[in-house]
Image (spheres, rainbow, N blue to C red):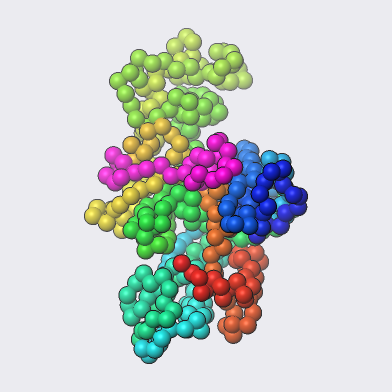
Amino acid sequence: MAAARSTGKAGTPRLSKVFAAVNVGSFRVSAMIMGETENGDLIVLGSGHRASAGVKRGYIVDMQGATYAIRDAVERAEKAAQVEVQSVWIACAGAGLQSHVVKVEIDIGGRRIEDEDVEQLLVEAQGMIQPDGRTVLHAQPAHYTLDGAHGIANPRGLHAEQLGVDIHVMLADGAPVRNLMEAVQNAHLDVEGVVAAPLASGYACLLPEERELGVALIEIGSDVTNVSVFAAGMLLGLRAIPTGSGDVTDAIASVLGIRRFQAERLKCVSGSAISSPADHRELIPVHGPGEPIESTALGPTARGADENNRIARAKLISIITHAQAELTGEIAKALKEMGFSGANAGQVVLTGGGAELAGLDEFTQSALGCPVRVGRAPALTGLPEAHATPGFSALAGLCLYAADDPIDIRSISNNYTRATRLGGGLGPAFSLRRLVRAAKEYF
């Protein structure tokens, strides 16, 4: 829980907890402050964003620039929320994320399963985590098994010869994670925890039934596209593609010979992943409203433009679809490597800022041969319309993750008498009382 000062906005219901989250992307840095009322309702108190700085392909490349951007985004959220926060949850999109599942079983001998058996099982699972020199971001129980039967929500009170659990483990390279944490700490904020961006986006975009039956989540950022597969209620596979919507913008700028900010505006305002017969007849201006057609500051006239610096919309869409086809090809390859193809394929959900491109869901559905929808944060009280878009789904998911406070097996002591804070802020701090409650009430 993020520490906070202030009584908040007038008329806001009395809050029992406050959570703050920061998503440090290559295109923008965004922050959100969420409160939980005494009756368990979640309210977005404030949010803010600004252009990113010091981040490339999900990695911190300029500590000072990234720190300033983080501090600025948080201050904007604090101003909107009228709340000051001292600690935040942060999302990690790069850092060589890797996901795998650890399966652990213990003998029960046919007797009734007690709380102590579940605790022993989770402690046994701790020793099965093999990070191989990498940082463990999450180690969470997904579901239990009884004599090999999967999908058991609560095994207590049941009889079995063997009790098992599937633990979802998320690994990352240590140095990039430490750089991300340091950038936040330099902004005078404590780190509550680091959450893998695909997991955070899954909290915001995916339905529980989808995560159970099988779904692919495609998070298209500016520089990185994370492709993840969920099934049996947990994240089973993850691939990071070092290409994103920013590469589509670069392709437009390169082919037309224009400035990058002009290419971004063209993509967002007039771009689409689906063409129409009228595109050849429609001329769109390369310059924005109020900009002079000829200006050395804006660069030369676009290649192929008319005397008014206009191009056919069909040309823009051709550039976009060519670049998008390359990215979709990489996505298809990643899904195939994770076994999510052919008869094993299912629902695909697009999210991230790149998913806001018009017609991208239809384009991707045709390319992958799977049903595709665009995912965004659920309707949250107080969430501004501008932040209820796919580009802010990971941010909202971070807050939802913090509110859910999932159990992490690394926080269970091997004698069941104490709990520790692990990883210098990489795992949440659990009290013994909360751990016991979580173990009893899981699912």
Q: Which residue is pictured at 54% across the width and 68% down the height?
A: 407
Is 295 drawn above or below residue 109 in the view shown?
Answer: above
Identify the residue at the far top of this view.
Answer: 307
Q: Give the quarter of the figure containing the N terminus.
A: bottom right
Q: Which residues are magenta?
A: 365-393
Can residue 61 be seen here?
A: no
Q: Position of residue 302 (x, y in %)?
A: 48, 19
Name the image quarter holding residue 154.
Answer: bottom left
Q: Nearer the viewer, residue 152 or 273?
A: 152
Name the image quarter holding residue 182.
Answer: bottom right
Name the image quarter holding residue 4.
Answer: bottom right
* 277 relative position to 128: left or right: left
Instruction: Check if residue 386 falls in the magenta segment.
Output: yes
Can residue 233 be seen here?
A: yes
* 421 relative position to 251: left or right: right
Q: Position of residue 442 (x, y in %)?
A: 49, 69
Q: Position of residue 305 (x, y in %)?
A: 44, 15
Q: Which residue is pictured at 71% across the width and 52% down the height?
A: 85
Instruction: Check if residue 394 falls in the magenta segment.
Output: no
Q: Position of residue 385 (x, y in %)?
A: 55, 36
Q: Which residue is pictured at 66% across the width and 58% down the height?
A: 16
Q: Nearer the viewer, residue 230 or 431?
A: 431
Q: Nearer the viewer, residue 215 or 128?
A: 215
Count of labels in the image? 0
Q: Which residue is pictured at 39% across the width and 89% down the height?
A: 111
Is 2 drawn above or below residue 373 in the view shown?
Answer: below
